[in-house]
Image (cartoon, rainbow, N blue to C red):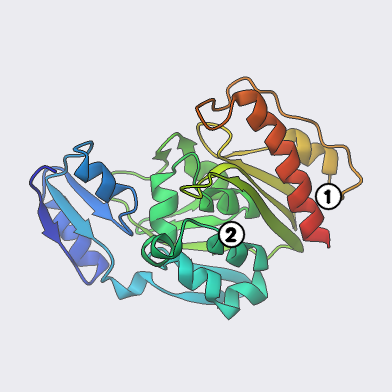
Amino acid sequence: MYEFKYHRPTTLSEAAEIHSATADAQYMAGGQTLLPSLKFRLSKPSDVIDLASVSDLNFIRMEGDALLIGAATPHADVAASETVRGTIPALARLAGLIGDPQVRNCGTLGGAIANNDPAADYPAAVLGLGATVITTGREIAGDDFFTDMFETALQEGEIITAVRFPKAAMASYAKFPNPASRYAIVGVFAAETASGVRVAVTGAGPCVFRATDMEAALGQALSSSVELPAPAADGLNSDMHASAEYRAHLVTVMAKRAIADAIA
């Protein structure tokens, strides 16, 4: 681990001030990716700004008909929240499937989507529900937020403050997890929203993506009787855990499971 300065601000303005005054600072939410990268000397920030004590970032509440979740809200809180369970049960279930108890109690919503790991779970919910990412300077549609592997639309110094999830008529998440890490080898979030069906896939490609062919086949409603088109294997991830062809197969299987659960 390289030497760095550690900061623990209690307000967003304090965090932003520290960031602007340093040469190569990095924000930390839950630290589930940053800390291992520091230990293995894969990351070398001059300063680490821990957002865990910024209380304004940790909340779950309704905003009209939408569910608003603070960026520093741990996965375990989302999974256990009666508000989340009563509004978007699929989101609570997804949060409960992330990692193990330690990861769920340390990892946060904002950290997960800002990091945009190709096998992370939350990006599928953001994209699948058509959520809006709220930052210190603007609001970003979920469709525009995830840009590539470990890359997002966030600008330098921009902090995610919350995510606004619209209610869905029905939704569910199904994943084929890595047995050790519980990361998604393939995960599919299917939702029937006001604008039609949305199907988001994580784990299969370099970045979370919408299965537009499946969405077109389903139209305006989730149905287990619709024949879902299998995605092409070209461009999908291939590693020691699963080939691109197997991941393509899993996308269809997980989509069918998510849809069946949503309409049950």
Badge 1 marks a residue whose secondary structure is loop
Looking at the rendered structure, the kind of residue marked 1 is Gln
Q: Quadrant of the C terminus?
A: bottom right
Say few, some or many: other residues with alpha carbon within 10 Å of mark 1 (under 14 / 14 to 19 / 20 or more).
some
The answer to whether residue 141 of the structure is visible from this angle is no
| Residue 245, placed above or below residue 14 | above
User: What residue is rendered at 76% in x and 33% in y?
Assistant: 213
Q: Earlier in the sequence, mark 2 or mark 1?
A: 2
What is the residue that sits farthest to the front in this orientation?
179
Residue found at the very far right of the displayed protein: 225
Where residue 206 appears, as percent x and y from the top left, is 50, 31
Towards the viewer: 119 or 88: 119
Picture residue at 43% right of the left edge, 75% below the top: 59
Seen in the picture, residue 144 relative to 97 is either above or below; the reply is above
The quadrant of the picture occupied by the N terminus is top left
Residue position for label 2 = 94
Q: Residues within 10 Å of mark 2 (few under 14, many from 20)?
A: many
Residue drawn at point x = 39 percent, y = 64 percent: 102
Instruction: Let me know if residue 38 appears in the view.
Output: yes
Tag count in the figure?
Answer: 2
